[in-house]
Image (spheres, rainbow, N blue to C red):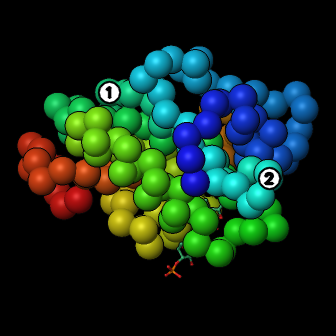
C-alpha cells in the first residue's frame, strides 16, 4: 500500500465502481489538489486497491478537521481478502499524522457491512441516492482522535 497519483487509480475506479463504462465520470475536481491523498494497493505491478481522500467540511461534526473518502474500490477478483481494510488503515495512518480528526464518506449501502466491520459509524437518517450512480448511499464517519465532538455520539 502506498501513496499514488489519482491518474494511477482511474482505471480501477472505472472498472469496479462504474462497470467499466468508458462514458462514466471517475474524476473528482479535487483530485490534483495538494491536500488530497490517494492510496493504492499493489500486487506486483498491478493496482488492485484504491482509496482517495479529500479535505472537506463534514456533514457531521463540522468543527472537526475532516477528510472525505471517495472511490474506495478493490479489484473484482481480489475482494474479501482484507485489502480494503489495509488500504484504509494505510491512509488513516497518514491522515492522523496530518492532524485530521475525522473521516467521512457517502457509502454505498451494498458496502455498509464493510465499513461497520472496520470501525465506521452510520449516520441514521442520511440515506440518499447518489447523483452520479443513482445507487442508495448512506453517510458514514469515523473519528481519528480522542476529541469529543459536540452533538455526535460515539466514534
Ligand atoms: C467494499 C470493499 C471496498 C471492501 O473491500 P474488501 O477488500 O473486499 O473487504 P475486506 O476483505 O477488507 O473486508 C473487511 C471486513 O468487511 C467485511 N465486508 C467486506 N465487504 C463487505 C460487504 N460488501 N458487505 C458486508 N461486509 C463486507 C468482510 O467480511 C470483513 O469482515 P471480517 O473482518 O469480520 O471478516 C470491496 O469489496 C469493493 O470494492 N466492493 C465494490 C465497490 C464498492 O462497493 N466500494 C465502496 C464504495 S462506497
Quadrant of image for the C terminus: bottom left
Residue 87's disc number: none
Compared across the picture, whether 46 is left or right of 22 comes to left
Q: 90 or 10: nearer the eye?
A: 90
Looking at the image, is mark 2 or mark 1 earlier in the sequence? 2
Q: Which mark is residue 46?
A: 2
- Left or right relative to 29: residue 76: right
Closer to the camera in the image, 7 or 62? 7
Mark 1 is surrounded, within 10 Å at the Cα level, by few (under 14), some (14 to 19) or many (20 or more) other residues, namely some
Instruction: From the image, tell me which residue sits under label 1.
Output: 57
Classify the position of the N terminus by image quarter: bottom right
Q: Is residue 37 above or below residue 138?
A: above
- Foreground disc of the pair 2, 1: 2
Residue 90 picture location, percent across and down: 46, 54
The picture quadrant where one finds residue 38 is top right
How many labels sit on residues?
Answer: 2
Residue drawn 28% across the image and 42% down it: 97
Picture quadrant of residue 119:
bottom left
Q: How far across and down, in percent of the image, does residue 20 sit?
A: 87, 43
Amino acid at each position: 500500500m502506498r501513496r499514488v497519483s489519482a491518474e494511477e487509480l482511474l482505471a480501477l475506479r472505472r472498472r469496479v465502481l462504474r462497470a467499466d463504462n468508458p462514458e462514466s465520470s471517475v474524476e473528482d475536481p479535487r483530485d490534483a489538489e495538494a491536500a488530497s491523498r490517494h492510496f493504492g494497493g499493489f500486487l506486483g505491478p498491478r493496482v488492485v486497491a484504491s482509496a482517495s481522500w479529500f479535505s472537506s467540511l463534514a456533514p457531521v461534526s463540522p468543527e472537526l478537521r475532516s477528510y472525505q473518502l471517495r472511490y474506495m474500490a478493490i479489484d473484482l477478483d481480489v475482494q474479501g481478502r482484507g485489502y480494503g481494510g489495509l488500504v484504509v488503515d494505510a491512509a488513516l495512518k497518514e491522515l492522523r499524522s496530518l492532524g485530521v480528526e475525522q473521516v467521512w464518506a457517502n457509502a454505498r449501502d451494498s458496502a455498509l457491512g464493510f465499513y461497520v466491520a472496520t470501525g465506521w459509524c452510520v449516520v441514521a437518517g442520511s440515506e440518499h441516492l447518489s447523483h452520479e450512480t443513482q445507487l442508495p448511499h448512506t453517510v458514514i464517519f469515523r473519528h481519528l482522535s480522542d476529541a469529543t465532538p459536540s452533538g455526535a455520539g460515539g466514534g
